[in-house]
């Protein structure tokens, strides 16, 4: 049984992805809050050319952190996903695409199943929009 699965795309202006956010990602994985199912870095150059960056090209420190994440890498991120990200990226920008499973929700999901509960709807309200709830 899997927990909820989300994708997150984070843009970086100036192609300056340095892997520094991976520390917090690693903390969430180590805590058992999430698991990383797949991850990709997409870079758009000044001419509009797009590259999916291989982990080895990110340097030894980043490669080490990525290895510790135990990314399943089931090929969930395909070329069509890379092209979709490329369409919204400005030249000289990059993006990280992350697919995560919410492990914290698995016991809740099992409890719902055990209680004969059925999911009727789901969604997400981003913190920036939460002020509209008041």
Image (cartoon, rainbow, N blue to C red):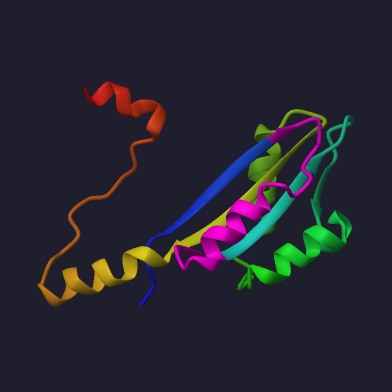
Q: Nearer the viewer, residue 47 or 69?
A: 69
Residue ID at (82%, 31%): 92
In the image, residue 131 above or below residue 47: above
The reply, left or right, for residue 74 in relation to residue 131 is right
Query: Which region of the structure is painted magenta?
Result: 12-36
Report the side of 115 relative to 17 (left or right).
left
Residue 54 shows in this picture: no
**Relative image position of residue 77 (x, y in whole percent):** 63, 60
The residue depicted at 78 percent of the width and 66 percent of the height is 64
Along the line of sight, the residue nearer the viewer: 124 or 50? 124
Q: Position of residue 27 (x, y in %)?
A: 57, 59
Q: Position of residue 30 (x, y in %)?
A: 55, 67
**Residue 17 shown in magenta:** yes
Res. 36 in view: yes
Of the pair 40 and 16, the residue shown nearer to us: 16
- Residue 71, compared with residue 41, is above or below; it is below
Residue 53: within the magenta? Answer: no
Number of marks in the image?
0
Q: Residue at x 79, y 64 (%)?
A: 63
Quarter of the figure with residue 130:
top left
**Quadrant (top left, top right, bottom left, bottom right) of the N terminus:** bottom left
Residue drawn where x is 33% and y is 64% of the image:
105
Quadrant of res 11: top right
What x and y, as percent, mark residue 110?
24, 74
Quadrant containing the C terminus is top left
């Amino acid at each position: 049984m899997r927990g909820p699965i989300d994708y997150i795309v984070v843009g970086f202006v100036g192609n300056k992805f340095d892997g520094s956010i991976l520390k917090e990602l690693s903390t969430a994985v180590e805590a058992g809050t999430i698991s990383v199912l797949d991850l990709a870095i997409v870079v758009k150059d000044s001419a509009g050319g797009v590259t999916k960056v291989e982990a080895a090209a990110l340097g030894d420190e980043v490669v080490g952190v990525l290895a510790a994440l135990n990314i399943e890498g089931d090929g969930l991120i395909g070329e069509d996903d890379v092209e979709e990200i490329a369409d919204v990226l400005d030249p000289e920008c990059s993006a990280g695409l992350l697919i995560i499973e919410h492990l914290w929700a698995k016991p809740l999901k099992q409890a719902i199943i055990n209680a004969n509960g059925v999911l009727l709807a789901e969604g997400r309200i981003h913190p920036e929009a939460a002020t509209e709830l008041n």
